[in-house]
Amino acid sequence: KQSPGLPETQAVVEGTARSPNEQPAGLSMTNPSPSSVVLEELGGQVPLDSPFYVERPPIEQHCYEAIVKPGALIRIKAPRQMGKSSLMLRILNHATQQGHRSVWLNLQAAGEQSLENLDSLLKWLCSRISRKLGLKDKVEEYWQGALGCNDKCTDYFELYILEELKVPFALGLDEVDQLFQYEAVASDFFGLLRSWHEESKFNPVWRNLRLILSHSKEVYIPLNINQSPFNVGLPVELPPLNDDQVADLIQRHGLSLSPREAVSIMDLTGGHPYLLRVALYYLVREEISFAQLMQNAPTAEWAYGEHLRRHLYSLQEHPDLLAAMKRVIAANEPIRIDATEAFKLSSMGLVRFSGNDVIPLCDLYRQYFKEMLGG
């Protein structure tokens, strides 16, 4: 992903998503023809003007209402490729339309050297924000003196950025779980974000800072309950698309699937937005028939290959999760596994809960891992 700034004049597209109840699955009297559909590159953020972004009510509306409140903090949690970045982009765009300034940063762009050192991370944060806002970089000036880097960063925000802007500032920090492997840095950094949020309750300057955090992994690093930003603000968990939303997306691709085909593609992908868009992309391009899709999808040679291998490698790096996933795949019904392993597999997007039990998220994962892991 690249990290371009969000220009204040960015076009608004919140209204492009139709109500998911407008059209039933399998019926498409008013669909565009597949030949007239302009497809987009797969992966990464869904552009603001994309016709393929499907809202998941009431999530977007709740986020739009929250971001304009003083001292707002929104935390988005979902597995990878479930739409976190695309939602964040729209929240920031909404803030911009309300006269706020906004910046989107992906912590992956900070690089390992910055992430493993708190001072370097905070310097990177301040420099990148200054550049994206068109402000002069004054990091070296504010980093003089004996204060700790947390205090220097706080001063940079309070005495420079927020003071210079004089309007609400929405900051989106994407993929903050990049920090989870550096426990000492993560503890101090997330404690700093929490302190800014608390400061907004009595300091008018900090009321103008609005934070959005996104992460895919469960927060298992030790954080003091009073110093964590993950137990305050508005929590948002992105679910898979439901049946109506899947039907809506199928129609936007100009495809006329039968009710049985619509059910089959829902079962295959589990409503996972990325998996679904990949399937529809190749169907629109007529590079694969529906029957071939259902046959080839769970194989390493097709378009899902890289996605599936990434999950397989992740499991192989964690023997406890690998063993738990084998049990889930071997069962033909929801199964009870260790709670910690269940939440970790869920945060990876491999399983979903059925009460306190779990089942594979979709048939794609069930078929692929049954073949690769046995059982």
Image (tube, grey):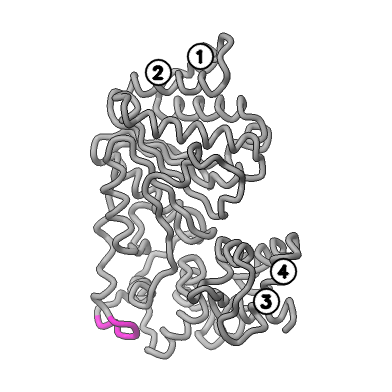
Mark 3 and mark 4: Cα distance apart in space: 10 Å
Along the line of sight, the residue nearer the viewer: 224 or 297: 224
The amino acid type found where label 2 is placed reads Tyr
Dot 1 or dot 3, earlier in sequence: 1
Residue 128 falls within the magenta-colored stretch: no
Q: Give the residue drawn at x 39%, y 17%.
A: 159
Quickly name the residue at label 2. 160
> Which residue is at a point 34% across and 64% down the rendered structure image?
56
| Stretch of the chain drawn in magenta | 24-29
- Residue 82 x %, y %: 48, 61
Sequence order check, earlier mark of 2 and 1: 1
Q: Position of residue 337 (x, y in %)?
A: 63, 73
Principal secondary structure, stretch drawn in magenta: loop
Residue 236 horizontal/vertical position (percent): 40, 55
Q: Which residue is mark 1?
A: 142
Residue linked to disc 4: 322
Q: Amino acid at mark 3?
A: Phe
Residue at horizontal 49 percent and vertical 65 percent from the top? 274
Cα–Cα gap, marks 3 and 2: 52 Å
Callout 4: few (<14), some (14-19), or many (20+) C-alpha neighbours within 10 Å? some
Q: Residue at x 44, y 52 (%)?
A: 76
SS type, badge 2: helix
Find residue 369 and name its label: 3
